[in-house]
Image: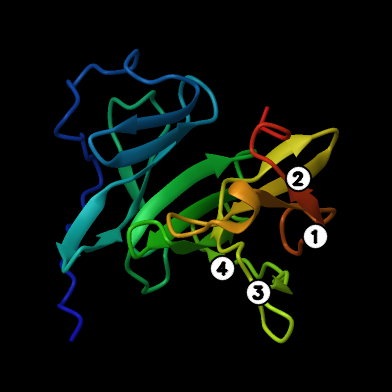
Amino acid sequence: MIPARFINEQIDYIPENNDTDNSNDWDVGYNYNEGEETFFINEDLGYQLPVVDAALGSRFYSLLKTENGGTSWETLNQDPYIGRTGVSAGIIFINEELGFIGMSHSGGSYGELYRTKDGGASFEEVSIPEIQVSLSETETYNPFDLPEMPFEENGKLLLLVGQGQDGDYKGGCKALYQSDDRGKTWEYIKEVLPVEFPPS
């Protein structure tokens, strides 16, 4: 049975692990602090995934937004993972409208990717085409089940999907995908080793 979720709707929220005047505490880009993932597009505009409830190893998150460098935060989305529980596995905003968040399950064994096209007000789960590889002469499986955060290169979005904590296919290689429609749909490109194609 999933426990009831309690959400405190605070308009001017200041994270407990930060001082009131914390405008210089954040780097532009990705930040991680005591289990909370934050992404700043610039020195003023940032998004954060704080835990609002937890039970049996799974967590519920909300999405906060700041427009003053983290001095104050507003609840933008009370349920960015649209009812699902797990552990946050990344956050990135390509611009003020387009962003992605990830969620992992079973200690990082597998996960999902979620996309927003309205600045975090709503999200939808991204469908990533499965790649089947041979397990034996008669069996196949999809080893790539833990998506990372998309990144932009030469005007296109690229995505690496790893194998999670339990993966051992070809020494931990990953699947590389490309999107030509800003992350709405993805096309499989090839298998890569992590050292071959690190995000820029």
Find the distance from the CA under tag 2 to the CA under tag 3: 30 Å
User: Which of labels 4 and 3 is toward the front?
Assistant: 3
**Amino acid carrying mark 2 in the image:** Leu
Label 1: which residue? Answer: 188
Labelled disc at residue 157:
2
Which tag is nearer the camera, tag 2 or tag 3?
A: 3
Front of the two marks 2 and 1: 1
Give the alpha-carbon distance from disc 1 to disc 4, as whole Å: 20 Å
Residue assigned mark 3: 135
Q: Amino acid at mark 1?
A: Tyr
Q: Earlier in the sequence, mark 4 or mark 3?
A: 4
Q: Earlier in the sequence, mark 1 or mark 4?
A: 4
Q: Give, as a three-letter code, the residue at label 3.
A: Leu
Q: Secondary structure at mark 1?
A: strand
Marks 3 and 1: in contact by CB < 8 Å?
Answer: no
Q: Nearer the viewer, residue 104 or 156?
A: 104
Q: Position of residue 106 (x, y in %)?
A: 34, 65
Q: Which residue is mark 4?
A: 124
Q: Secondary structure at mark 2?
A: strand
Q: Which residue: 15% across, 77% down?
A: 4
Which class describes the residues within 10 Å of circle 2: few (<14), some (14-19), or many (20+)? some
Q: Is residue 2 above or below residue 16?
A: below
Label 4 to label 3: alpha-carbon separation = 32 Å
Q: Is residue 77 visible?
A: no
**Residue 83 image position (x, y, % from top left):** 36, 74
Query: Looking at the image, is mark 2 or mark 1 earlier in the sequence?
Result: 2
Secondary element under disc 3, as helix, strand or loop, is loop
Residue 188 lies left or right of residue 198; in this view the side is right
Q: Nearer the viewer, mark 4 or mark 2?
A: 2
User: Which sits earlier in the primary sequence, circle 1 or circle 3?
Assistant: 3
Q: Residues within 10 Å of mark 3 (few under 14, many from 20)?
A: few
Q: Hey, what amino acid is under mark 4?
A: Glu
